[in-house]
Image (cartoon, helix red, strand yellow):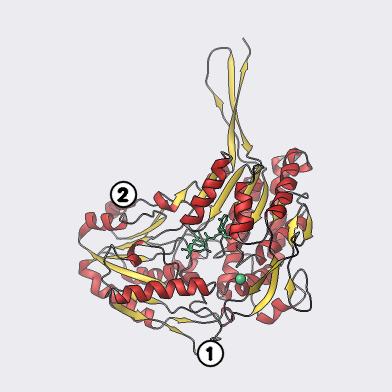
Amino acid sequence: MLDSASRAGAPAGHGTGAGPESITTGQIMGSHLSTTVAEGLAFMQIVDGRKVDSLSGERIDVACPSDGKVFASIPASGSADVDTAVKAAHTAFSEGPWSRMPAFERGRLLTRLFNLIGEHGDELAALESRDTGKPVRQGKADVAATMRYYEFYGGAADKMHGDTIPFLNGYTALTLREPHGVVAGIIPWNYPLQILARVAGAALAMGNTLVVKPAEDASLSTIRIAELALEAGFPAGVFNVITGYGAEAGAALSAHPLVDYVTFTGSPLTGTRIQQAAAVNNRGVTMELGGKSPQIVFADADLDAALPVLVNAIIQNGGQTCSAGSRVLIEKPVYEAVATALEERFSKLVAGPHDADLDLGPMINRKQMERVTGYVAAAEEAGIPVLARGSVHADAPAGGYYAPPVLFGSVDPQAAIAQEEVFGPVLSLFAFDGEEEAIRLANSTEYGLVAGVWTRDGARQHRVAKRVRAGQVFVNGYGAGGGIELPFGGFKKSGHGREKGFEALFDMSATKTIVFNHG
Ligand code: NAI
Ligand code: MG
């Protein structure tokens, strides 16, 4: 899902334009931020073109995962707030200037937002890093990828068109691509800027209006983007943001009868709940529900090229990436060589605060840290060998949510760490014997999001890429979803629907067929 894939050897090619060169923690305390109050930074949500608090006045503390200290707050909204926002979005869709705007003008607004994000690149990158704990270089990479989304969909808005269809004599049949109406976007905390961009870019390009519910752990950049969207000139009610807890604001949003389509990225369990809520209203959904993505290393692979990519694909964003490469399947003749090289790299990895810009940052919150360390402890208890363990920097604040990277070898394919999404810096190695076993192992989880295949054999590249059940397969590379242009989404428990690229424009619209009888 994320796009800072260039270091992972992916065909990404973006990352230019944001250009924030020097980010310090100090900068994000200053006047960049929207609202400052004495005890911290009180962010407001965006409803119908205005910055507003929750109707109840209740707020949620925002802590930095690097030290666990509160530095801001966001509104804690509930169903009444959601109702106001959805009604505003519904009115903007059916009656406002947005409903009469030609596609190219929607594209121009997205392009204006792209430019404004560029102007605020430093601020957004620093804010995202502080809110999520991700290293500052990852915050910068996220801003660069975010810009590419708005640039891509700004250009795509007037390129989507329908068909004329050969039909009976005396008839002309044609199709139009029409927006759904109000799109609800429920966003996770791992790549808030990027995931918001892939939702908002495609939804707005097609003429929908939006109500976004960012994660309670990472709402700040979403609020800032919605503020910039107002500055860019999006009409009131087109881009609404409601902050709050999932079980309150999120549940109310996915169940609202005036929501026409729901798009979600997050855990399979929450995905099921959201689909059940949307089903009551018989509305469509896009679900991106994570993975247990394999990288398959054949004995003839270019190991020097593969090794840094294997490490980065699980370490990037602390492994809190839906498309993390969390399983490495290694052909037996090179198993020892690959395992030894990975051991060496893993033992040198260091976690630390976002502004220290080390190999990885903290986990998003205490619960996620405990989830990761819990999986590691259970695997150790089950006798799965730890090949290497990274460290937490000695100066890392004691209140931060750190989980050191762990490399497990000779993992039983049925073990929990082989089957379940850990969502942390935990890599499992498996040995295989030949192509058939590689494919069987690759497909042996309930997930099917991304896969990597490393081999110099061209025919094998094609065979394996076709037989692995994954929405994206990278050959001699790994993109972690990389590339704004590339359709992305899963098979099986990883979800359904496709985001990114031109494909997303189909998910964010519906076909209308019109038939003329002219005799
Ligand atoms: P989650 O799936 O519960 O949260 C994601 C979003 O859903 C947040 O905005 C949250 O407020 C919202 N939400 C939660 N409950 C809701 C409900 N009943 N109705 C509507 N919205 C609701 O994920 P959580 O609990 O933060 O993380 C747990 C695990 O989920 C992680 O360890 C990871 O395995 C997975 N996850 C996967 C992500 C991905 O990119 N595929 C992203 C985040 C989490
Ligand atoms: Mg946060």
Secondary structure at numbered mark 1: loop
- For residue 10, which numbered disc appears in the image? none
**Residue 501 placement, left or right of 49:** left
**Residue 93 placement, left or right of 149:** right
Residue underneath mark 2: 467
- For residue 395, which numbered disc appears in the image? 1
The residue located at (77%, 52%) in the rendering is 48
- Horizontal and vertical percent for residue 51? 78, 60
**Residue 365 placement, left or right of 412:** right
- Horizontal and vertical percent for residue 123? 69, 71
The residue located at (53%, 18%) in the rendering is 167
Q: Would you call the spot at circle 1 few (<14 residues within 10 Å), some (14-19), or many (20 or more)?
A: few
Q: Are marks 2 and 1 in contact (CB under 8 Å)?
A: no
The residue located at (49%, 46%) in the rendering is 497
Ligand 2 - quadrant of the structure image: bottom right
Between marks 2 and 1 in the image, the one whose residue lies nearer the viewer: 1
